Image (cartoon, rainbow, N blue to C red):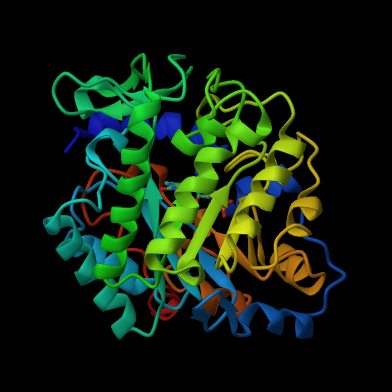
């Protein structure tokens, strides 16, 4: 476990990344960034947020999705079991980013889904969520160039589409460090990479997950292939939009073939600058990406982060409706949503479900609080990471926080 002193650095970095207000109050941060919620939707409209729906083969009791949140802990621990169990009233939990293989790790002590011990650890989590009546999908992750040699098997360096270092930091045993220089993945390594996604998806279903979300967002490996800022390849995985969207299509196609398209979702973040992600022309790139996802046929959902992850929603103009128009499966939106924004997105047909990230950290019963219009608790940024119970499983539900 990192020392508390190191966590201060991490917290500071996280707050910069997430665009939180200085006191870490998510609601205050969201309101400061996006203004107060629109008032023209009556409370009766709000029932749409709590109505059931399906995303592919996954039936949701409501449309409040829990967005993935990385936590510290290699194999899911008893604390993780409790953390996810407490949040089982979400229509769907998307569990934290989880690496598909050892080279896919980019932060200290993040979990994987490639060993039997990891599968067994996750099985305890999915059992607990299912026993509490919830649904849970696993986010399949490969960080690509957002890693550090100290986190990788001996002698390995991070892999990326091209040997271009990111202007980004990661959390290692020594605290925050600049990510290491990557090497370009060789063309002949790509089939094994895709096979590792396939195996990870099979393992996730073996661990009892209701589905998976392929992490193609936030400047990690698949996003690095998508964007021309990080992909300078000259083979069939680089250059044209058709070539840069190839890895995404092949990975998602393989996962869908392995576990069923109706259990396969994908996360995209067309304009986020997270982890030094940038592209010269994201609109046609992501339109083509979604067309290729549609061509796979029957995918459960696309989950789009609108704007800068955890930050401004509309600093970079982007036509999200043009993406949605290209996809016939479930459409999940995220980033800075509150109840009124979520209800508006659902009522206006801009989404089938809304994912909440930071609000779920301190509000295990977020669905109940949204239903009752109860106040949301803010989280303590000093206890976001660290591996202990504090700031992880000790946020009380409404009845306890208001009792006495
Ligand atoms: C502590 C923390 C950890 C996160 N970990 C992940 C992750 O593992 N995978 C991912 O795709 N996004 C991750 N995110 C981003 C959230 O899923 C979400 O996109 C972001 O918080 C914006 O949504 P919000 O405004 O509802 O919080 C994380 C965010 C936070 C605050």
**Left or right of residue 202: residue 295:** right
For the point 61% across and 43% down, the residue is: 269
For the point 73% across and 63% down, the residue is: 341
Q: Position of residue 310 (x, y in %)?
A: 57, 43
For the point 36% across and 64% down, the residue is: 395
Which corner quadrant of the image does residue 136 belong to? bottom left
**Left or right of residue 108: residue 180:** right
**Left or right of residue 292: residue 384:** left
**Left or right of residue 215: residue 128:** left
Could you tell me if residue 374 is visible in this image? no
Q: Position of residue 275 (x, y in %)?
A: 50, 28
Task: Identify which residue, 268 or 43, lies in the foreground.
Answer: 268
Task: Please state the total of marks drawn on the protein image.
Answer: 0
390 over 373 or under it: above or below:
above
Which corner quadrant of the image does residue 128 belong to? bottom left
Q: Position of residue 126 (x, y in %)?
A: 28, 72
Locate the C terminus by quadrant: bottom left
Q: Residue furthest right?
A: 40
Could you tell me if residue 236 is visible in this image? yes
217 over 365 or under it: above or below:
above
Q: Position of residue 368 (x, y in %)?
A: 52, 79
Locate the N terminus by quadrant: top left
For the point 22% across and 41% down, the residue is: 109
């Amino acid at each position: 476990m990192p020392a508390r002193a190191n966590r201060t650095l991490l917290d500071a970095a996280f707050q910069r990344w997430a665009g939180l207000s200085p006191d870490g109050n998510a609601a205050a941060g969201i309101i400061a960034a996006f203004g107060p919620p629109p008032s023209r939707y009556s409370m009766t409209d709000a029932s749409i947020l709590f109505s059931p729906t399906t995303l592919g083969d996954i039936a949701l009791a409501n449309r409040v999705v829990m967005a993935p949140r990385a936590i510290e802990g290699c194999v899911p621990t008893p604390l993780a079991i409790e953390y996810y169990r407490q949040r089982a009233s979400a229509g769907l939990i998307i569990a934290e980013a989880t690496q598909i293989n050892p080279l896919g790790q980019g932060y200290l002590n993040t979990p994987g889904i490639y060993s039997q011990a990891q599968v067994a650890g996750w099985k305890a989590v999915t059992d607990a969520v299912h026993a509490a009546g919830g649904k849970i999908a696993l986010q399949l992750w490969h960080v690509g160039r957002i890693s550090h040699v100290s986190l990788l098997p001996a002698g390995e360096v991070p892999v990326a589409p091209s040997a271009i270092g990111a202007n980004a930091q990661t959390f290692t045993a020594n605290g925050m460090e600049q990510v290491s220089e990557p090497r370009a993945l060789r063309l002949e390594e790509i089939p094994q990479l895709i096979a590792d996604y396939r195996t990870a998806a099979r393992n996730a279903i073996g661990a009892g997950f209701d589905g998976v979300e392929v992490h193609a967002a936030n400047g990690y490996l698949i996003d690095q292939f998508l964007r021309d800022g990080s992909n300078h390849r000259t083979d069939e995985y680089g250059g044209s939009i058709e070539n840069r969207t190839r890895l995404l299509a092949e990975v998602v196609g393989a996962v869908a073939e392995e576990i069923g398209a109706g259990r396969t979702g994908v996360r995209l973040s067309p304009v986020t600058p997270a982890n030094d992600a940038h592209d010269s022309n994201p609109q046609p790139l992501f339109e083509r990406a979604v067309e290729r996802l549609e061509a796979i046929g029957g995918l459960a959902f696309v989950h789009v982060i609108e704007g800068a992850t955890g930050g401004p929603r509309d600093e970079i103009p982007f036509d999200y409706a043009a993406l949605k128009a290209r996809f016939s499966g479930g459409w999940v939106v995220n980033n800075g949503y509150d109840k009124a924004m979520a209800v508006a997105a659902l009522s206006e047909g801009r989404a089938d479900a809304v994912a909440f990230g930071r609000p779920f950290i301190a509000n295990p019963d977020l669905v109940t609080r949204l239903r009752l219009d109860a106040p949301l608790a803010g989280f303590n940024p000093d206890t976001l990471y660290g591996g202990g119970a504090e700031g992880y499983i000790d946020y009380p539900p409404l009845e306890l926080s208001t009792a006495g």
